[in-house]
Amino acid sequence: IEDQASLVERVQTIPLGKLTIDDKRDMLTLMRQLSSMNRRQDDSFSTNSLRQRRQDATMVEQLLDRLLRERQHMTDAHNHEEEVIALNLAIKAWYNANVKGSADKAQKLLKRLTEVTTAENTKKQRQKDSQQ
């Protein structure tokens, strides 16, 4: 996988609707790496360690936002499971960052996850009702 910051920058420049399966796979792989519990085990409170964990969680959230923008653009071919995985990874990244404000960030993302899941369930129920 390419350099972390390079991947984040590159996918931000790809036009909406043009992310490939490989791009999405690379994004989710990086999100998994950056949200790893191993990142938290370095519970050093040195300035560099705290800065790196905050930067990691921020990159995960940037990748999440890009995936969500892609989803909004591609409403017909929407992959709900991919979106839920990405939101969970972003929540995990902020939890494992263990820096000031990370709990608030994780909680805001959890609220987004709940909203996305509720909207998807409502959509499925409407489709089911219309078929009856």
Image (spheres, rainbow, N blue to C red):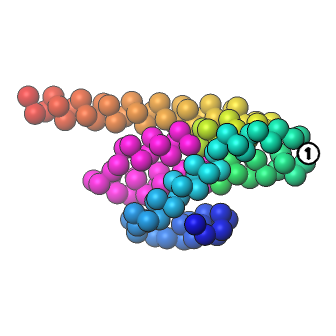
Above/below status of 16 relative to 118: below
Q: Nearer the viewer, residue 6 or 75?
A: 6
Q: Nearer the viewer, residue 74 or 35?
A: 35
Residue 124 shown left or right of residue 7 in the figure: left
Residue at coordinates 70% horizontally, 51% vertically from top-left? 56
User: In which quadrant is the N terminus drawn?
Assistant: bottom right
Q: Quick check: is 67 in the magenta stretch? A: yes
Residue at coordinates 56% horizontally, 43% vertically from top-left? 89
Above/below status of 106 relative to 26: above
Q: Which residue is mark 1?
A: 46
Question: Residue extending furthest right?
Answer: 46
Q: What is the chief secondary structure element of the magenta stretch?
A: helix
Q: Position of residue 27 (x, y in %)?
A: 53, 58
Residue at coordinates 25% horizontally, 34% vertically from top-left? 124
The answer to whether residue 23 shows anywhere in this view is yes
Query: What segment carries the magenta color?
Result: 60-89
Q: Quick check: is 44 in the magenta stretch? A: no
Above/below status of 119 relative to 62: above
Residue 96 shown left or right of residue 130 in the figure: right
Q: Position of residue 64 (x, y in %)?
A: 54, 50
Q: Callout 1: helix, strand or loop?
A: loop
